[in-house]
Image (spheres, grey):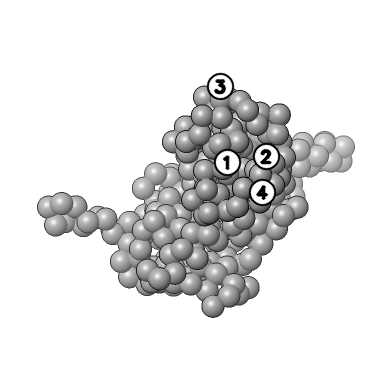
Amino acid sequence: MKDQEQTIEAKQVAFQYESEDGSSTPVLQNVSFSIKKGSFVSIIGHNGSGKSTIAKLINALLVPSEGAIIVSGFSTSEQEYLWEIRQQVGMVFQNPDNQIVGTIVEDDVAFGLENLGIEREEMRKRIDESLAAVKMSAYLKSQPQRLSGGQKQRVAIAGILAMRPSIIILDEATAMLDPQGRKEVMQLVHQLHLEEGFTIVNITHFPEETLGSDRIIVMEQGKIYADGTPSEVYADVEGLLAIGLDVPFAVRLHHFLQQHGFSLSTVLDQEELVDELCKSLLKT
């Protein structure tokens, strides 16, 4: 069962957490979507919307209560395919400190390769290539605890790249970083997507991080509220605000200006908004 055009498929997925007292907490309800190979998809929603649960379902850390998740042709519910699925999917988690296991950077990148039984010569090659890809070669012998949060996430990503997955999932991977660290990590991820062709699934609550995506899936109370391009999704400013989601600053300001009589083309980021305002002022 080899990789098809649809790298990830969710088919009428439901999931609920079971408590020790026998009660259950529904998290996802009848969720269906497909993600094409090589695409960049962001999943956004407030806390408790189910977005991080989706990440764990794709990596088979959780199994659907109902429905199915298919990754590269393999069902995550079938135990015999877990190895193949986890070789295909690399996860970058929220706290970089929780992913650091080596005493120096190269040992940390080597950890996953050792578990895969990669030969020493090939391991050395992959370590060097993956650290070069994330621009951390100069820190080969550095102690991870001395790195910044953004640098630690780069090392975590290098460890994933070394294992050669086809899909990278970022599960709130920038949530604990400062603005500069968030910017650096997202620039790196977009670069890897464009140059290496990875399928990227970015789980985030920062709306600005979704603007470079091919597509955005908005989660609300365990269901898909919206699914479309950034322009399509952020056209519904009032609807997104009504469900407690923020929108990018430029989108919010653009919406405000339109409500007060300015006729502007659709914009998503601040540079586009400045350009539109300058054009509008020149016409007056």
Tell me the quadrant of the picture where the C terminus can be found.
top right
Residue 121 got which mark? 4
The alpha-carbon separation of the residues under discs 2 and 4 comes to 16 Å
Question: What amino acid type should be assigned to the residue bearing mark 1?
Answer: Val
Is residue 215 visible to us here? no
Task: State the residue position of label 2.
Answer: 131
Q: Is the residue 210 above or below the residue 3 in the image?
A: above
Viewer-closest of 167 and 64: 167
Occupied quadrant, residue 134: top right
Estimate how packed mark 4 is, as few (under 14), some (14 to 19) or many (20 or more) residues with alpha carbons within 10 Å.
few
Q: Which amino acid does the dot numbered 2 rest on?
A: Leu
Among numbered discs 3 and 4, the one appearing first in the sequence: 4
Q: Residues within 10 Å of mark 1 (few under 14, many from 20)?
A: many
Please tell me the numbered disc located at residue 268: none
Instruction: Name the element at disc 2.
Output: helix
Name the residue at the bottom extreme: 1
Task: Identify residue for label 3.
Answer: 146
Left/right of residue 212 with respect to residue 175 in the rendered view: right
Circle 1 SS class? helix
- Label 1 sits on residue: 109
**Can you name the residue that lies furthest to the front here?**
120
Q: CA distance from mark 2 to mark 3?
A: 17 Å
Tag 1–tag 2 contact (CB < 8 Å): yes
Residue placed furthest toward the top? 146
The amino acid marked with disc number 3 is Arg
